[in-house]
Amino acid sequence: MQYLLVLCCITHIYVRTYSGTFGYWGYQQPSYYRYDQRMLGRPRHAYQQPALPYGYMDMSYHPYYRHLYRDREASVHSSVTAELLQLHNQHRARHCAPPLTISERLNKIAQSYAEHLAKTSTFEHSGNKLGKEPLGENLYMQWISRGKVNASAKAADKSWYDEIEMHDFKHPTFSKETGHFTQLVWKDTKKMGVGVAFSPNGQEVYIVANYYPAGNIVGPGFFEKNVLPAKC
């Protein structure tokens, strides 16, 4: 009888240890599993996929891996900024506008707002300012229903520049349909800053470009002076 009691105790300890290690029998799940379960949350949009099982979870939430994802996002921001500047200046040269330079101060402003958009899943202009002066601003957002979206400087630049097809160079003025293009090639703009941020689930990416001095100034002669036709 004593032997049997010891055997039962040993068996109970074994089961609890197994469940505690793998979270299989439901006695005690490891701390990292409980942490990630808390971070799942509910979908914010109807188009989002439901949360996947633990084995397919986004580990960027995990405290042990978060620094790796921060390094990745910093690398993405650097490459997108460099490519976006190059593409902007190619277009500006075509429209007889001087090249832009990157401003670290504008980068911080744009990045802060990109992170706000990604966190809140909203898409609207910021009204950002440099001191008391308003900044020009172009926004781009892309999402996918499954997996992780990539940040593409070419896609953002193309979406903005392609508005040239709707711009009337004979009677130039501001329009919501062409405002991204006209800001991109605005001759008096000298500096730009870029922000890139991903939504928590990685399915949305937001790119913010801020410009100084701001373009799209409405008034006699401003568009004629600053938005020139290609190969001028």
Image (cartoon, rainbow, N blue to C red):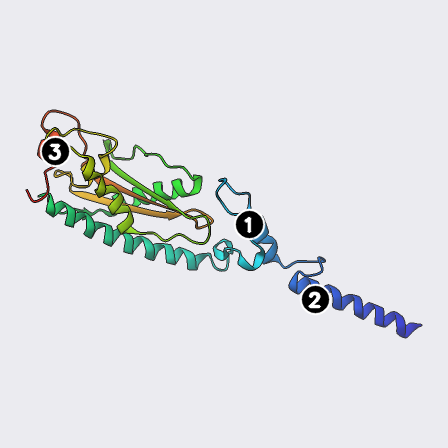
In the picture provided, is 55 more to the left or to the right than 218? right
Which residue appears at 50% of the width and 57% of the height?
Answer: 59
Q: Along the polypeptide, which appears first: circle 2 or circle 3?
A: 2
- Which residue type does callout 2 highlight? Tyr
Q: Position of residue 44 (x, y in %)?
A: 50, 40
> Callout 3 environment at 10 Å: few (<14), some (14 to 19), or many (20+)?
few
* Alpha carbons under labels 1 and 3: distance apart: 49 Å
Which residue appears at 65% of the width and 64% of the height?
Answer: 22
The residue most toward the top is: 220
Q: Position of residue 153 (x, y in %)?
A: 28, 51
Q: Quadrant of the N terminus?
A: bottom right
The answer to whether mark 2 and mark 3 are in CB contact below 8 A is: no
Which residue appears at 55% of the width and 45% of the height?
Answer: 41
Q: Along the polypeptide, which appears first: circle 2 or circle 1?
A: 2
Indicate which disc residue 18 carries: 2
Q: In the displayed structure, would residue 15 be above or below residue 173? A: below
The answer to whether mark 1 and mark 3 are in CB contact below 8 A is: no
Q: Which residue is mark 3?
A: 169
The answer to whether mark 2 and mark 1 are in CB contact below 8 A is: no
Q: In the displayed structure, would residue 172 be above or below residue 80? A: above
Front disc: 2 or 1: 1
Indicate which disc residue 51 carries: 1
- Please state which of residues 41 and 6 is positioned toward the viewer in this rendering: 41
